[in-house]
Amino acid sequence: MSKAIKVTGIVVEGHGVASGRSRTSPYKGGSLIRQLPYFEKLNIPLSDYFHGTINIDISPRAMELIAWDYEARETAWTDLIPPEDFFFSHCKITSGQKASDGMIYYPSPKTKVENFYNPNIVEILAPKIDSIETGGEVTLHLTPDHCSLT
């Protein structure tokens, strides 16, 4: 990703729904573990990634995904909410001197009725990265044709 868009942000706590850490989530084990079989059928390469998201606040900037590497449309992964559209874009995440491959996880705001969508938060799927912690600074390296930053 030689001409990547670089944006720095702070790792923030998410809702804990994707990872299953939320005590109030109706999805035992997390929503992501339930979604993965649908994504795998579409050959979206997420099997090496941690089953939770890294939530990065890029305020005052905001990001919109305008193109992507993979999509999962009308994914009916639960009977508790209507089907959702998901989009994924390759990226890199840098923490200190360590760079890791990752993927933007972008549930479409148009179909994500369950949670409030915050355009200042970028959700990343990646292998477990021990150097990343809440409150820490990271840099995202985003595909320029896929992301619009304001």
Image: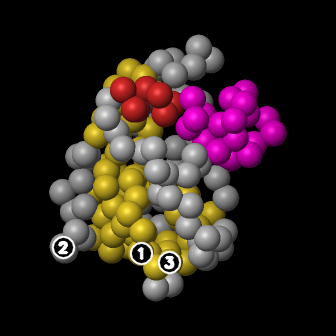
CB atoms of marks 2 and 1 within 8 Å? no
> Where does the N terminus fall, quadrant-wise?
bottom left
Image check: 146 left or right of 49? left
Q: Is residue 24 magenta?
A: yes
CB atoms of marks 1 and 3 within 8 Å? no
Residue at 55% of width from left, 78% of height from top?
Answer: 137
Residue at 72% of width from left, 30% of height from top?
Answer: 28
Q: Where does label 2 land, which residue? A: 3
Front-lying residue, 139 or 126: 126
Image check: 55 left or right of 7? right
Task: Give me the C-alpha separation between circle 2 and circle 3.
Answer: 19 Å
Above or below, 113 against 91 in this view is above
Residue 99: give its label: 1
Task: Give me the C-alpha separation between circle 2 and circle 1.
Answer: 16 Å
Q: Residue furthest front?
A: 48
Above or below, 120 against 40 in this view is below
Task: Tell me the amino acid under the disc marked 2.
Answer: Lys
CB atoms of marks 2 and 3 within 8 Å? no
> Where does the C terminus fall, quadrant-wise?
bottom left
Q: Residues within 10 Å of mark 3 (few under 14, many from 20)?
A: some
Q: Where does label 3 land, which residue? A: 95
Task: Give me the C-alpha separation between circle 1 and circle 3.
Answer: 6 Å
For residue 26, which quarter of the picture? top right
Name the N-terminal-most of marks 2 and 3. Answer: 2
Task: Tell me the amino acid under the disc marked 3.
Answer: Ser
Front-lying residue, 92 or 82: 92
Which residue range is magenta in the image? 15-34
For residue 136, which quarter of the picture? bottom right
Residue at 66% of width from left, 69% of height from top?
Answer: 134
- The nearer-to-camera label among 2 and 3 is 3
